[in-house]
Amino acid sequence: MSLEQRLKVYRLTEAEYKKICLLLGREPKGVEWAIFSALWSEHCSYKSSKVHLKKFYNKNDRVLESFGENAGVIDLGEGERVAFKMESHNHPSFISPHQGAATGVGGILRDIFTMGARPIALANYLCFGEPKVEVMPHLVDGVVRGIADYGNCVGVPMVTGHTEFNASYNGNILVNAFALGYFGPEDRVFTSGARGIGNYVVYVGAKTGRDGVHGASMASESFDEKNEGKKPTVQIGDPFMEKLLIESCLEVMKEDLVESIQDMGAAGITSSSFEMAAKGKVGLNIDLQKVPMRQSGLTPEEILLSESQERMLLMCTPEKFARLKEIFNRWDLDAEVIGEVIEGSQIKIHWGAELLTELNPVDVVDHAPEYKRQYSEYKSVNKREKIAPSKFDKFTFRAAENINLCSRDWIFNQYDQRVGASTAADCSQSVGVVELPHSGRPLGIALGCRPPMMRTDIQLGAYDAIAYPSLQLSSKGLQPLAVTDCLNFGNPEKPELMTEFVASVEALSKACEAFDTPVISGNVSLYNETLDKNVTSTPATGVVGLGHSMEKVPKDEFCVEGERAFLLRCELWSGNFYSADAYNFPVEFTGDWDKEKVTQFAKDLQEYVNEFGPSTSNVVGKMGALFELMTMSQSGFSVHLDKPLADSMCAERLYEVIVTAKSGDEFKSFWQKRNVEYFDLGKVMAEPLKVDGNLVDAHWTSEPFHKQLGLE
Amino acid sequence: MGSDRKPIGILRFLGTNCDRDIWKAVQSVGLEPQWLWYQDRFDPEDYSGFVVPGGFSYGDYVRSGALASLAPVLGCLKEANEKGMPILGICNGFQILCESGLLPGALLKNESTRFIDKWVKLKRVNASPYFSSNEEINIPIAHGEGRFYCGESTLKELQDREQIWLRYSDNPNGSVDDIAGILNANKNVAGLMPHPERAMKKWMGTSDGYSFFASLADGGLQ
Amino acid sequence: MKVGVKVLPRPEVLDSQGRAVEKTLSHHQLKINQCVMGKYVVLDVDATDEKEALEQAKKITEFVLYNPLVESFEMEVI
């Protein structure tokens, strides 16, 4: 093979090749090509994004672990901690929706229990193309079934989700999975740095097959028409095996049998062994022939690159291995010693008696290329001094025609939302809430990033990706604490895309600092483009918040007769966002980020909810307050408005909250002192929504979602 | 109540995932839960009752509940049944009880072929002496294979012998005769697809599931 | 010796998977009279002749592979 061909196969540039030669002091040989190819891929090395990710606001007193580990960990007090992370599985899900989405869930769960945390909640952020695109129903159906098959079987509840449709995702869907795990007061946080000379390197879980070979470098490539041929690289997940891994790994950790542990994710055993060694600053001796194999005839290179699912790599002291193996066997799993921790700083990879390579993991992992891709300063193009407010009757009754506005219950009714018996707010609510096992406090998860906002303005959209979920948590009386993100962008080699990436990271970081919610984990997915068309820049976020009392978490919808409803308005921006998408209103907005105003509003909301315990509290989402009121009225309880008030509730304003009060006077005395406008919407009645005495049909969202996709 | 009672045995198979929820539910009514691992053998006399929790035993491979029904622990559970001890199977536990022959019928893939998670209204048709419930309750289902099926003659027997325990008000999965839960002829074995352990407190949605476990604590059984 | 075991839902039982395939096909103007979905299991057994192989396979199938209440099965030496 010529050098040129080789670089193409291993997806390395000539400059990267030269760097390898410099680091090694010679030409790479044999399996070294595969090792560098995998670990220097965009997916594993973050080579285009690393330089900007360092800008993230990522520390405060609560943060125990952040980037560099499998997931971030924060301290919740009372001995409780949680680990959480969000990750993309976009490319595999487009090629094979069912398996791609399922293994996405499997992978993110392993990142969590690898830390020693028991997974207690899942969430998912999905972006699909237009329903009329021929493959789209198949993709929606496959992704939803894949997530359901995996998450339901492992027994972790799905507590919230976000699904968007737009033409920009026609050729490249987004499938981002979020998982959160729990540490009780007795539980230790486990990390991945290899340590202890003479310790065993132990392989646990499913046997290695040929699936997923070159998966990491595939995820770093743009799609083209030839992708059909890439099917074999999609991995097959086995949630039953994952469930056994969760239980057995948590058990060996509880018995303190493990020194360090990491799952085998992208680039399989290569990335886990090199990263563990690099972090621990030790060497490893590994014999690939000892790796349990599912099929005969696997080459060393295939073993190194296999992305077979449900596998873990751990290190333990030789004395503890017998007990460790006994526990794994009790769960019907094998644990095999495949090597040991050695002095020095070399990873020696053997094939039986033959030494295949000897590499310094620091060269491969820490000296991976870092690119300063070209970008420029972001300029808002859709910002106006002032915009004309949209009118009430223009769109209200056409809402059901747009797939972005209908209920997602068809999706989330396929997910087990209550296994664990700790779910207080399920996917039907804006914030997923679970009970913390030890203290009994509520923990909330809200997802952010609204693509219509990103299309209107990158900075506004990125601020909103933190502010909106943070306000949603606050509206439930929960204090936002920390963030994970999944940055889905197009081709970073195009300066205009890199500009959007950098502007997003900077705005996200500013917003995180404002809310004091550090980014503790995340993932970057670049090259989300097909045939030169990029997806909407989509920095999806997951924000986690903590409250005081399970009984006090308000509902999204009206549910108690006799309370008084109010609209709170803390306006930073107004514009056409979802309405621009749905009704071709001009894409424009007005207003500015105001850190003090929005963070104070969040604190006031938390205080109000915790002090006065309203039954209903909900941040206005798509299409303005009247539209939100319609969705909140589907419970059978609502208010009666006059036309002028209803008209004033038709523009998309960031941010508004609809909240009830047991006493109108208490509400007023609380909010009068604050820098927030409010409107009295009247008494909540067991009646449908009326405007000027006319019934507003509140059942307009009944089942159009899957019918629009032609699904049963 | 309950403190002088023998423990409740909770069966665990590879892939069971509601075991910890049942543990909490049993504790919350003042009873002592104890694990029974699928490979264990046990003396029924050491327990006051048994729960087979939900989940995906063996990944639901072959048929849901089929592989679990062959586990050693089932042999002892059958002995407990012969002594007339109370046995409750929930969701996958119901499937396991049907597969092992402790309850009649079979549970098939939902009519929609999709997993369904939602709150359902149930009507109590006949009372179980051990697992009490109100006449109308609201508790959640979460299953992909919950369509109860039996032949016409079995159905007639179930009706005649008052073995139909719970019916759906609005059948979600295509079950024969809207059946959500059944009892054996002796009424000591009960199986249902919905999850009472997920409706123990008001913040979960309802507390309609509480009485299913509370009655194990105050029931007239030893 | 290998025995193939074909397990199919009994005709009186609603086959929800088969029905879903039928519906999908009809949406794509692909006409069929019926679709029945079951499973095919290959058992590799130690046996000296076909009769013995089939006997072993029958025993295994009746033990766990099929539920007589809702399924039927056929076997073939392959």
Image (cartoon, grey):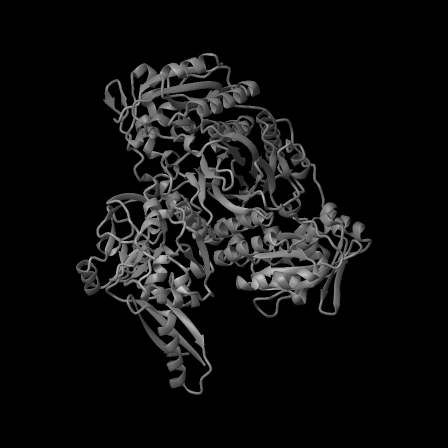
Residue A629 placement (x, y as % from top left):
35, 26
Residue A202 placement (x, y as % from top left):
65, 60
Task: Report the residue at 82% width, 53% height from top.
Answer: A25
Residue A398 placement (x, y as % from top left):
31, 29
Which image quarter holds the N terminus of chain A?
Answer: bottom right
Residue C19 versus residue B25 in the image, above or below: below
- Residue A377 appears in the rendering: yes
Q: Nearer the viewer, residue C54 or A131?
A: C54
Residue A422 versus residue B143 in the image, above or below: above
Q: In the rendered view, does A443 fall on the left or right side of B60?
A: right
Q: Nearer the viewer, residue A98 or C47?
A: C47
Q: Nearer the viewer, residue B84 or A692?
A: B84
- Residue A89 appears in the rendering: no
Q: Nearer the viewer, residue B26 or A320?
A: B26
Residue B107 placement (x, y as % from top left):
31, 59
Q: In the rendered view, does B14 fall on the left or right side of A312?
A: left
Which residue sits furthest front?
A: B4
Task: Report the residue at 39% width, 44% height from top.
Answer: A411
